[in-house]
Image (cartoon, rainbow, N blue to C red):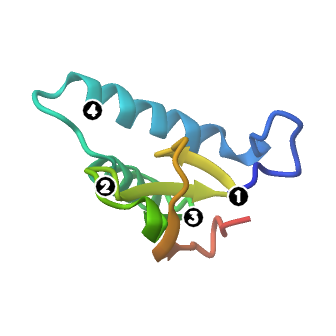
Amino acid sequence: MPPSAGAPDGHHPGNGEARRLAASVMRAAARVPGESKCLAQAIALQWMLRRRKLGATLIIGARPHQRRGGLTDLHAWVVRCEEILIGESDEPHHPIYAARFESAQAPVC
C-alpha cells in the first residue's frame, strides 16, 4: 500500500491517535508469553479503533502463488488513510479479504 500523499513522511496527519493505539498493541504483544501473530494484533487494533469510532480496514493477504510454502504465506495488517498502522511487511502479500469499518463521526479518509 502506498503511503499517504498528504504527508511527506507517509503519515497522515489525522492518524495520531490511531498510531498511538497501534504502538500500544505492539508493546502489549511484545510482553505476552508466546508469540503474538499478526492476525491477533490486527484484530486487537481494529477493535480498539472501532471502539473509538476511528475508521480503518483490516486486510488479510497471501503471498504470491510462486512464493508460497512457508509459515508466512498469510499476513494481516490494518490500514487507515492509506497508512499501514500495524503489520507492515517486507514481503509482498496480495489482499484476499478486507474488513472495513467506517464511522459517520470519523470516516476512513
Q: Please, what is the three-letter code of the amino acid marked with disc 4?
A: Ala
At label 4, counting other C-alpha atoms closer than 10 Å, the crowd grade (few under 14, some 14-19, many 20 or more) is some
Mark 3 and mark 2 lie on one chain; the one further toward the N terminus is 2
At label 2, counting other C-alpha atoms closer than 10 Å, the crowd grade (few under 14, some 14-19, many 20 or more) is some
Report how far apart the C-alphas of labels 3 and 2 lie in the structure. 18 Å
Residue 81 point in image, percent of width and height:
70, 58
Q: Which mark is residue 60?
A: none
Q: Please, what is the three-letter code of the amino acid marked with disc 2?
A: Leu
The residue carrying mark 2 is: 39
Report how far apart the C-alphas of labels 3 and 1 lie in the structure. 9 Å
**Residue reaching furthest left?**
33
Element carrying mark 3: loop
Report how far apart the C-alphas of labels 2 and 1 lie in the structure. 20 Å
Residue 59 visible in the shown view: no
92 to the left or right of 26 = right
Residue drawn 47% across and 39% down?
A: 22
Mark 4 and mark 3 lie on one chain; the one further toward the N terminus is 4
Report how far apart the C-alphas of labels 1 and 4 lie in the structure. 24 Å
Residue 54 visible in the shown view: yes
The residue carrying mark 4 is: 29
Q: Which mark is residue 81?
A: 1
The residue carrying mark 3 is: 55
Mark 3 and mark 1 lie on one chain; the one further toward the N terminus is 3
At label 3, counting other C-alpha atoms closer than 10 Å, the crowd grade (few under 14, some 14-19, many 20 or more) is many
Mark 1 and mark 4 lie on one chain; the one further toward the N terminus is 4
Q: Quadrant of the C terminus?
A: bottom right
Q: Nearer the viewer, residue 69 or 25?
A: 69
**Residue reaching furthest front?**
66
Residue 43 point in image, percent of width and height:
33, 57
59 to the left or right of 72 = right
Report how far apart the C-alphas of labels 4 and 2 lie in the structure. 12 Å
Q: Given contact means CB atoms under 8 Å apart, are the residues at marks 4 and 2 in contact?
A: no
